[in-house]
Amino acid sequence: MHAKLDRRNFIIDTLGAAAGLAAGGCVTCGDEVGRTYPGWRPGELDIHFIHTGTSENTFMILPDGTTMLLDCGHVKRRAPGYAEAIPPEPSGKRRAGEWVRRYIERLVPQREIDYLMVSHWHSDHIAGIPDVAESFRFLNYYDHQYPNVGQYRRDVDAKDFDTFQKWLASALKDGMKREPFKVGAKNQIRLLHDPADYYKGVFSIRNLAANGVMWDGKDGLIDVAGEHVKATGEKTIRENALSSAVRIRYGGFTYYTGGDLEGDFVGADGKKFSYEARVGEVTGPVVVCKTNHHSFPAAMQDGFIKAVKPQLFLSSSWSPNQQNILSLRRMTSRENYDGDRVVAYGAIPEFKMRQFAQNGLANFLAPAGHAVVKVNPGGFAFRLYTLTSHDESMRIVGIRDFLCC
């Protein structure tokens, strides 16, 4: 897994891929649709957006082989009609975390994952993590609140929260390391298998926000939640707004992920503002954007979208309400920014697809299934693989190539 990367071959592969794209080719040649996903190679950045129909789960393999699981949830109860519209996949015979664990087992041979990161305490983001831990040992851990766990707590499922905290205490006792997520830091989450610094200056992770504190884009921080509490007298804040957010940069490729970040706050001046838009402004344009809060209408507002301007949106789905005309129109509107873009949902019910087609939005959609972003060595281009989520074959059902600039 952590194979040594030869610098000469790295340069040759990168230049060769660049020439192929310039000539109208692709990052990996040949028609791969119908074949099995090829897996990770040294120098590539793989982002697996794993669809289960009941959770949000992202597994990453960084260019040097460093691995990271960002959220893994499980939703036990859904309103009538939701299970029929977006069923658990591959089936409801296992919990979402079990399916994610089996998915990761097909990707990596070792049974250690370098980083576990929790964006916020909602069940669809944390309840599956103990299931993954049945096969994998996590080495390093970050969440959005430590050491102030429970601060501002409002809308958290008490049972799932307590279950996770008990598992966390056990994992820490077994040697997993935990430290505070430092907002504004660059490379607190770093490449762990790159002793020769092949990627120094090429790869970085910037901590953007957590627990209502955001980076100011320079050398400072803004305690947005603290200002809001002081200005309004409110002592609790919706958990979504407390989500942690990071920006990954690899060459010309950039990726934003921010859990369920959304909402308005009141500033020190007493004026209301969009927290999501402010985070988007310090994030800046990215190539790929995970949608905030599953692209519910309260998230993915125009201000945020205008700031990040991605070519590809990734959106997990376990409710038909997360796939709505309003949000999709905002994400695809040329009034927000120019250029082509694609939206990848994990699942698209037939009645939703009919709505999107009737409103001229269907052409923006990638095939449904697991979305895998594979960034080429050097980070100048990437390929979107869509893998079937109906079974565990890792069969490719769709491919699309992108340039990062």
Image (spheres, rainbow, N blue to C red):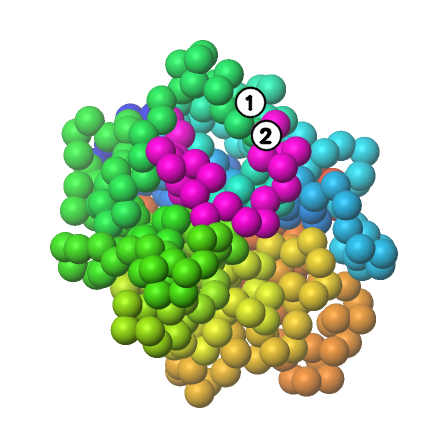
Is 153 above or below relative to 127? below
Question: Residue placed farthest to the top in the image?
Answer: 174
Question: Residue placed farthest to the front in the image?
Answer: 233
* Three-letter amino acid code of the residue under disc 2: Asp
Quadrant of the rendered image containing residue 302: bottom left
Quadrant of the rendered image containing residue 164: top right
Is 255 above or below relative to 338? above
Q: Nearer the viewer, residue 296 or 382?
A: 296
Residue 339 on image: x %, y %:
41, 79
* Three-letter amino acid code of the residue under disc 1: Lys
- The residue shown at (57%, 80%) is 329
Q: Quadrant of the N terminus?
A: top left
Tag 1 residue: 166
Residue 114 on image: x %, y %:
39, 27
- The residue shown at (59%, 49%) is 155
Tag 2 residue: 162
Which label is found at residue 156?
none
Estimate how packed mark 2 is, as few (under 14), some (14 to 19) or many (20 or more) residues with alpha carbons within 10 Å: few
Residue 109 on image: x %, y %:
50, 22
Mark 2 and mark 1: span between their CA atoms?
Answer: 6 Å
Query: Which span of residues is magenta-colored?
Result: 140-163
Residue 146 is left or right of residue 102, and the answer is left
Q: Nearer the viewer, residue 244 or 265?
A: 265
